[in-house]
Image (cartoon, rainbow, N blue to C red):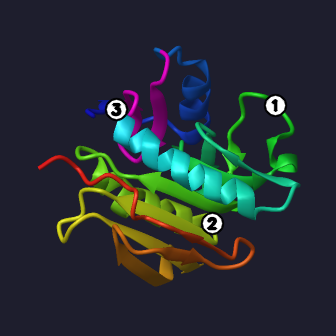
């Protein structure tokens, strides 16, 4: 999956208005990263398969006042960024207000990103830094392209723009999300990337 970048050099309000007015093809995502607005095509089937597994586990583990969202615009305005995580867990109350306004990242309890080969650096570094700045309490990174083999890493305890704790497991081993989820995600069904 190849992302296109539109470098604008504008201030946050202008970037946000431009993002809100974009008319993208179905399935495409637009995010505001440090270098401008990045547009990404729809992910492959394997990516969606993993997302479906994690989505189901999360829905079964959360309180009825919370929900799991896909394609949710999430802002970290303190650093001038807007992400669209693969999955985000937030209360229904977080989605009130102006329909096209992004949800402030600090209102999320968990974000999940599933890397793609060409933009894995954004998920590993840029978004990790951004989510920690929000701070989002839990960041689950599913990295099919990790240099040491496909892995899942749970980052927790955000502080000063990074996460103080992390737990990494290889595909095939379960990973446990702490409260308020208290659930294990079985990664044995996650497809590895093609050789």
| Element under disc 1 | loop
Neighbours of disc 1 within 10 Å: few (<14), some (14-19), many (20+): few
Secondary structure at numbered mark 2: loop
- Most extreme residue toward the bottom, as rendered? 164
Residue 98: which disc? 1
Q: Which residues make up the magenta segment?
A: 26-43
- Front residue of 167/40: it is 167
Task: Identify the residue position indicated by label 2 in the image.
Answer: 136
Say which residue appears at 17% left-offset and 46% top-offset: 194
> As drawn, which residue projects farthest toward the front?
189
Percent coordinates x, y for residue 131 in the rendering: 54, 62
- Whether residue 99 sits left or right of residue 11 in the image: it is right
For label 3, the SS is loop
Disc 2 to disc 3, C-alpha distance? 27 Å
Q: Which residue is mark 3?
A: 7
Q: Sequence order check: which comes first, mark 3 or mark 1?
A: 3
Residue drawn at x 27%, y 34% as measured from the top left: 1
Indicate the position of residue 95 as horizontal and vertical percent values.
80, 41
The residue positioned 62% from the left and 46% from the top of the image is 74
Q: Mark 3, mark 1: which one is toward the viewer? A: 1
Q: Residues within 10 Å of mark 2 (few under 14, many from 20)?
A: many
- Does residue 195 appear to the left or right of 74 in the view shown? left
Comparing 44 with 74, the one in front is 44
Measuring 45% from the left and 40% from the top, which residue is drawn there? 48
In the image, taking residue 4 as reference, residue 87 lies left or right, namely right
Which mark is first along the chain, 3 or 2? 3
Query: Residue 28 colored magenta?
Result: yes
Residue 37 quadrant:
top left
Q: Find the distance from the CA under tag 1 to the CA under tag 2.
A: 22 Å
Q: In the figure, 191 relative to 47: above or below?
A: below
Left-right relation of 6 to 94: left
């Amino acid at each position: 999956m190849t992302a296109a970048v539109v470098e604008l050099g504008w201030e946050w309000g202008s970037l946000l208005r431009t993002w809100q007015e974009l008319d993208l093809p179905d399935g495409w995502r637009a995010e505001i990263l440090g270098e401008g607005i990045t547009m990404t095509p729809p992910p492959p089937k394997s990516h969606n398969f993993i997302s479906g597994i994690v989505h189901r586990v999360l829905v079964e583990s959360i309180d009825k006042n919370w929900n799991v969202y896909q394609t949710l615009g999430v802002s970290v305005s303190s650093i001038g960024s807007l992400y669209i995580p693969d999955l985000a867990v937030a209360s229904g109350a977080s989605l009130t207000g102006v329909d096209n306004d992004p949800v402030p990242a600090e209102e999320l309890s968990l974000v999940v990103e599933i890397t793609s080969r060409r933009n894995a650096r954004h998920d590993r570094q840029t978004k990790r830094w951004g989510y920690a700045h929000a701070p989002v309490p839990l960041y689950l990174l599913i990295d099919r392209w990790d240099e040491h083999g496909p892995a899942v890493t749970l980052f927790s305890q955000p502080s000063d723009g990074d996460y103080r704790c992390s737990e990494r497991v290889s595909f095939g081993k379960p990973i446990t999300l702490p409260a308020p989820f208290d659930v294990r995600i079985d990664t044995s069904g996650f497809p590895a990337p093609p050789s």
